[in-house]
Amino acid sequence: MSSPQQAGAMDARTVQALQQAADQVVHAAITRGTPPLTPPRNEPEIVACFVIDGLAAIQSAWDALLKPSGVLVGMTGVFCHLKPMVSFRHGARPDATCELADLLIVHDDGFATRRGGPAGPTFIPRTRRAVLVQAKKNKTGVVRAPDPTQLHLYRTWPRFTLEGTAYSIGSPGTAEPGGRYGLIRTGGRRRPGAAWHAVQPAPAMDALTGPTLGGYMARMVGGWPRAGRPAQPGGSDDWSRLVDLLLAPAVDDGFNIRGHGIGSRRSHRLAAFASVPRPGGSWQPAGPGQPLSLLVASGPPLLRLGFGDVGRGRPRISTIHIRTASEG
């Protein structure tokens, strides 16, 4: 892994260590899952295992690596297996439709002040990067002829409509670093081992041509180029507006994965997965009988999302929100 030529970026050794820690968690999510999702059978279940049980483990490992440098880490995840559909012009079709993504990953870097005001400590974001990920799973991690409509979306980013609002997030004919295919290889005789890679969209894709998902997340946090697309919290440009929209899921809809005994629930209570550690570095709800919910938080309370940060309205997409901050 070569160092980036960009001011303020983390060194290659630190990013490599972050990647290794995250890759171990991703591998476990693919191969073993997490109770009651054991083992995951498809892309939604892998995403669920990673979000529900993986973020706390990654946060704990990254915290140990970054705290000596004075950097705090917090993570919040939302699993939501809905399909946000977008429509756009594609060739002769004026209203071609496809799924926007399976997962949104956002990294906010900023400052943490413990002085604050009456509301307590404050996290002040400075920079944001985000990436949309469309998951594809098979044994080898080689994908040929993916859905042509979605490939056109990811390669050109034409003007599209989501929930009645139009977005123009890219120049037609150019690929933006805001979209990647997440190729999940489960392992086979020709390519043993399981991993999840973030690959640039193409008519034929090989997982090994892109960094692992853990490596991509580490590069985002490290400030490396072409690892997530810059956005601005509350910004007026269409990419920033889209990220803000997708980061505002509801907490009143549970999720249901057939065959694993997770029923659909309706509750405004959040399962505090970060509050009770258990062996192996994973986390469990704070109290018996507490419903399995959409929101999973780990890290310092200062950097976790709370009720005030979670919007009402229908959840749209699974998200991983990483916050890093220098304490001031």
Image: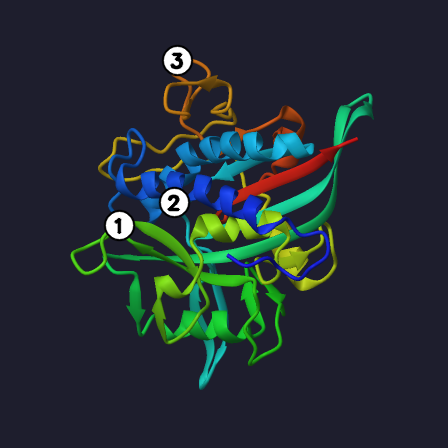
User: Marks 3 and 2, how far apart in space?
Assistant: 25 Å
Residue name at image x 57 percent, y 51 percent: 12
Residue tagged by mark 1? 193
Labelled pair 3, 1 in contact (Cβ < 8 Å): no
User: Marks 3 and 1, how far apart in space?
Assistant: 36 Å
Residue 192 x %, y %:
22, 53
Residue name at image x 61 percent, y 56 percent: 224
Hey, what amino acid is under mark 2?
Answer: Val
Hey, what amino acid is under mark 1?
Answer: Gly
Residue tagged by mark 3? 288
Residue count near mark 1 (Cα–Cα under 10 Å), binned few <14, some 14–19, many ≥20: some
User: Could you say which is closer to the camera, residue 260 or residue 10?
Assistant: 10
Labelled pair 1, 2 in contact (Cβ < 8 Å): no
Compared with residue 312, is residue 279 higher up or lower down, i.e. above or below? above
Q: Mark 3 or mark 2, which is nearer to you?
A: 2
User: Could you say which is closer to the camera, residue 307 or residue 114?
Assistant: 114
